[in-house]
Image (cartoon, rainbow, N blue to C red):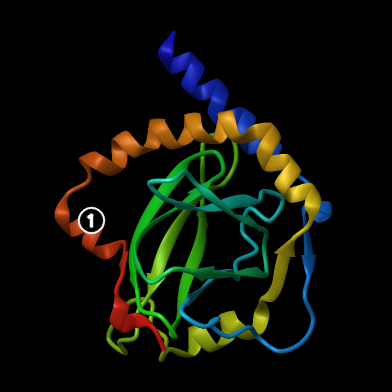
Amino acid sequence: MKKYVRMTAALAVALMLGGCMSSLMTKTPGAAPSPEPGKALVIFMRPSSFGGAIQSSVYDTGKQGDDFIGVVSAKTKLAYQADPGTHLFMVVAENGDFMNATLDAGKTYYVLVSPRVGVFKARFSLLPIHNDPAAKYSLQSQRFQSWKSETSFVVKTPAADQWYAEHKASVNAKQAEYMQKWNRAGAQQKAELTLHAADGI
């Protein structure tokens, strides 16, 4: 029974984020944002068109509750002004997934929102882009430059916050389910899913 409930919740969130939801986000023309005073800027980018009909929502999970950052669709990116220090970021679609981060004020960090094949819809992971030319996902790579040029900044509309208010319980259920998997992950896996302070530029 519990397995059925988890599968139903997974499908419900996936369907909520499926299809055309342009009313939730809007493009922001102009220059790329910079970190606000005393803040770190985190840019979540999804350059891949794989699973393009499915969108994912991104959150900053914290002791005072989750901060809904926005919805990421194919070829878009979100800019998030974060407090310096440690964070646990989360992406939700059919699944939930997490990434650790330690951020310095005044720096800009990049995260890849990466889709993969799921059971009913596409699943997503958050992958840190490191300030290291030898890293698999590197700020110095040609791929990173392509990702920047191929994606457009978007911001939330009031409809996005309304959507989150209406579906917060479902998101929280997905978070609780997949947090168990995250807590069981080994040290090496979590190290691979960590954005370091030195990764900022």
Residue where numbered disc 1 is placed: 189
Looking at the image, which residue is at 57% across and 46% down? 122
| Rendered location of residue 150, percent (x, y) | 66, 80
Residue 21 seen from this side? no
**Is residue 87 shown to the viewer in this render?**
yes
Camera-side residue of 86 and 78: 86
Q: Residue at x 64, y 56 (%)?
A: 70
Identify the residue at image location x=57%, y=30%.
Answer: 170
Q: Position of residue 100 (x, y in %)?
A: 33, 60
> What x and y, as percent, mark residue 20?
81, 49
Quadrant assignment, res 36:
bottom right
Task: Give the left or right position of residue 24, taking residue 58 as reference.
Answer: right
x and y, in percent, of residue 151 in the image: 66, 76
Q: Secondary structure at mark 1?
A: helix
The residue that appears at 39% across and 83% down in the rendered structure is 200
- Residue furthest to the right in view is 23
**The C terminus, quarter of image:** bottom left
